[in-house]
Amino acid sequence: MSPSTGAALRLLAATVDAKAVAEIGTGTGVSGIHLLHGMRPDGVLTTVDPEPEHQQFARQAFRACGFASNRARFIPGRALDVLPRLADAGYDLVFCDGDRLEFLDYLAESLRLLRPGGLVVFEGVFANGRTVDSGPQPTEVTRIRELLRAVRESQELVPSLLPVGDGLLCAVKR
Ligand SMILES: C[S@@+](CC[C@H](N)C(=O)[O-])C[C@H]1O[C@@H](n2cnc3c(N)ncnc32)[C@H](O)[C@@H]1O
């Protein structure tokens, strides 16, 4: 994740005064650290990843950055298995950085999870320039194009595609 993407995540979390953030794709915790910095001091990051060793690494990284252990809730598992168990309208921000083939499903789940005025954010929607390349592209890229179209056409969302890093698609739920 680029430093500019990290800074944007901090800004977005602070803009919605985030107390509850859901993250799809814990990874090594880089995005989580930025989100935690932008959230309220009592805010809790719920982060989902099927790889236990990724979550273990992120847990250590959060601790090394000085975040109390109760600032993060680690849920092991695939997003589409875990997200249906999370509370309706219980989140101020949903950050999607998991499996790009599932981005459209994450959008549907996010609309349910977000409170009105909450933000959904997708990382990497430029796909290293392939999203706007007219040549043949893998399914991952066609799925991202479908996501961009769905967000643009949604009556429930006010979107903006920020040209930071590999493209950060943001949308506010009305
Ligand atoms: C690009 S990395 C995330 C990087 C992380 N946000 C960071 O900044 O450190 C993608 C992560 O998504 C996880 N992942 C893959 N499929 C997933 C799924 N179906 N649900 C949730 N996470 C998934 C991978 O294990 C990987 O850790």
Image (spheres, grey):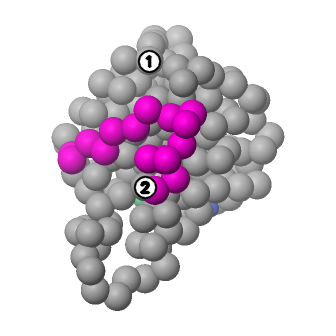
Q: Residue at x 24, y 33 (%)?
A: 7
Q: Residue at x 41, y 72 (%)?
A: 141
What is the x, y in percent for residue 88? 75, 29
**Is 114 situated left or right of 1 in this image?**
right
Amino acid on which disc 2 is placed: Leu
Q: Which residue is mark 2?
A: 148
Q: Secondary structure at mark 2?
A: helix
- Considering the image in quadrants, where does the C terminus appear? top right
Q: Residue furthest bottom?
A: 136
Q: Can you say whether 30 is above or below 172 in the image?
A: below
Q: Can you say whether 147 is above or below 13 in the image?
A: below
Query: Is residue 30 visible from the viewing direction of this image?
Result: no
Camera-nearest residue between 118 and 63: 118
Q: Secondary structure at mark 1?
A: loop
Q: Earlier in the sequence, mark 2 or mark 1?
A: 1
Q: Which residue is mark 1?
A: 16
Camera-nearest residue between 107 and 123: 107
Q: Residue at x 34, y 88 (%)?
A: 136
Q: Quadrant of residue 29?
A: top left
What stretch of residues is rendered in magenta?
A: 149-164
**Is 135 situated left or right of 44 in this image?**
left
From the image, state whether disc 2 or disc 1 is nearer to you: 2
Q: Is residue 33 magenta?
A: no
Say if mark 2 contacts mark 1, CB within 8 Å: no
Q: Is residue 151 magenta?
A: yes
Disc 2 and disc 1: Cα gap in Å? 22 Å
Q: Residues within 10 Å of mark 2 (few under 14, many from 20)?
A: some
What is the x, y in percent for residue 51? 60, 60
Amino acid on which disc 1 is placed: Val
